[in-house]
Image (tube, helix red, strand yellow):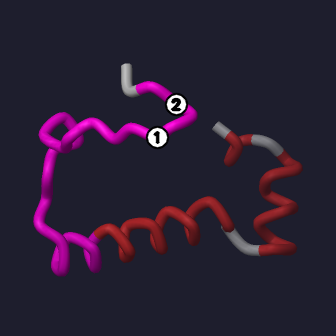
Amino acid sequence: MFQETPIFSRLVAERGDIPTQVRGEADRIHRDLARVMPWVAASDLPARTTPDRPAW
C-alpha cells in the first residue's frame, strides 16, 4: 500500500523501513515467548475481573 507512494519511498530512504523492522522485531519476540511460555488460547483463560470493571 504505502510502498507505491513517493513520500513513503523518501521516508524509507531517510529513516529506514520502520514497519518492516517493527514486524521483524515482533516476530522475534513472538518466537522467544513461544519458547518460554506454553501456548494457551485466550478463550481458555479464566475471566479477569477488577473492582471498577465487570467481566462481561
Around disc 2, counting alpha carbons within 10 Å, would you say few (fewer than 14), some (14 to 19), or many (20 or more)? few
Q: Which residue is mark 2?
A: 53
Around disc 1, counting alpha carbons within 10 Å, would you say few (fewer than 14), some (14 to 19), or many (20 or more)? few
Task: Name which residue type carries label 2.
Answer: Arg
Q: Are marks 2 and 1 in contact (CB under 8 Å)?
A: yes
Give the alpha-carbon distance from disc 2 to disc 1, as whole Å: 5 Å
Judged from the image, the secondary structure of the residue bearing numbered disc 2 is: loop
Q: Which residue: 81% across, 71% down? A: 13
The verdict on residue 46 being magenta is: yes
Judged from the image, the secondary structure of the residue bearing numbered disc 1 is: loop
- Name which quarter of the figure residue 9 lies in: bottom right
Task: Name which residue type carries label 1.
Answer: Thr
Q: Which residue is mark 1?
A: 50
- Please determine whether, in this image, residue 41 is positioned above or below residue 27: above
Q: Which mark is residue 31?
A: none
Q: As drawn, is 9 to the left or to the right of 35?
A: right
Quadrant (top left/top right/bottom left/bottom right) for the N terminus: top right
Q: The magenta stretch spans which residues?
A: 31-54
Helix, strand or loop for the magenta stretch, by majority: loop
Residue lying farthest to the top in this orientation: 56
Q: Which residue: 86% across, 61% down? A: 10
**x, y (%) of residue 37?**
18, 72
- Please determine whether, in this image, residue 36 is positioned above or below residue 13: below
